[in-house]
Amino acid sequence: MKYALVTGGSRGIGRAVCLNLAEMGYKILINFQSNIQEAEKTLELIREKGGDGELMQFNVSQKEEVEGVLGSWIEKNPDKVIEVLVNNAGIRKDNLLMWMSEEEWHGVLDISLNGFFYITRLVVKGMLVNKYGRIVNVVSLSGIKGMPGQTNYSASKAAIIGATKALAQEVGRRGVTVNAVAPGFIVTDMTKDINEKEFKSLIPLARFGTAEEVSNVVSFLASDKASYITGEVISVNGGLYT
Ligand code: NAP
């Protein structure tokens, strides 16, 4: 039984990733922090498409929760293999650095970066034993070029890009690939306070992207077809960065 674990699978990009991976035949472990209704909706949408999965509630930034919930699942299900891990859970807490509180700094770093660490080190073990695995980290344009007002967020995403490249070199020999996808402005709850009309003139494709446009790239990297790509960061930003 082959599983894909998607952190932050209850909404936005994570939900679209869950649906794509379910179409590829994976059973989906839908992680979320608190929004059980939206997580159930993701599962319902997966089932409508003929797939299946399980909800898995834990806060990715809390080591005890990650080990308690995900660690126990892995221990209790030796016959089940997590072949795909998508580290997608993330938040924004924007502020200028001079005004930034410790809560804003640590809140973003703890979820993006520590979450990546706690989860990936648990899941990669099984991938190494099976000599197959796909890890895809959802980062951001902000982690490549830096965005004012987002030193916390840019730092966390840039750190994951570094970790992606390092881990890719650790595990490549065992058939495990590690890549990152860097979205630009995507229409989800995370960007609902950003006015598309104001920003779209900066984007060569003249609009914000959709969660599906990101999940199509994530699911390609999570597939067999991406077998010779590792340590890469693929931008999905409508041409904004270049
Ligand atoms: P979103 O719509 O706000 O959804 C965030 C998801 O992350 C939800 O499923 C949420 O769970 C989950 N989450 C948040 N904190 C968590 C925690 N501590 N533990 C477990 N789950 C947690 O965000 P999105 O726009 O889809 O973003 C997904 C990823 O793409 C993030 O890493 C984000 O940084 C990145 N990204 C987004 C954009 C964009 O324009 N939207 C651009 C670049 C990068 P609950 O539903 O339970 O709250």
Image: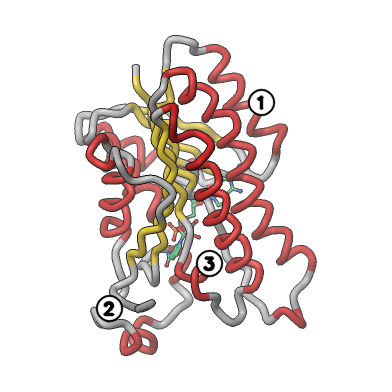
Q: Position of residue 132 (x, y in %)?
A: 38, 26
As rendered, which of 136 and 230 lies closer to the eye?
Answer: 230
As rendered, which of 9 and 37 lies closer to the eye?
Answer: 9
Distance between the alpha carbons at the discs numbered 3 and 2? 21 Å
- Give the label on residue 68, or none: 1
Q: Position of residue 40 (x, y in %)?
A: 40, 38
Residue at point 36% right, 64% down?
235
Q: Quadrant of the C terminus?
A: bottom left
* Secondary-structure class at tag 3: helix
Rendered image quadrant of residue 234: bottom left
Residue at point 31% right, 36% down?
44
Rendered image quadrant of residue 173: top left
Q: Which residue is mark 3?
A: 143
Amino acid type of disc 3?
Answer: Gly
* Secondary-structure class at tag 2: loop
Amino acid type of disc 1?
Answer: Gly
Distance between the alpha carbons at the discs numbered 1 and 2? 42 Å
**Would you say residue 50 is visible in this rendering?**
yes
* Relative to 69, 42 lies left or right: left
Count the marks: how many? Answer: 3
Residue at point 27% right, 38% down?
223
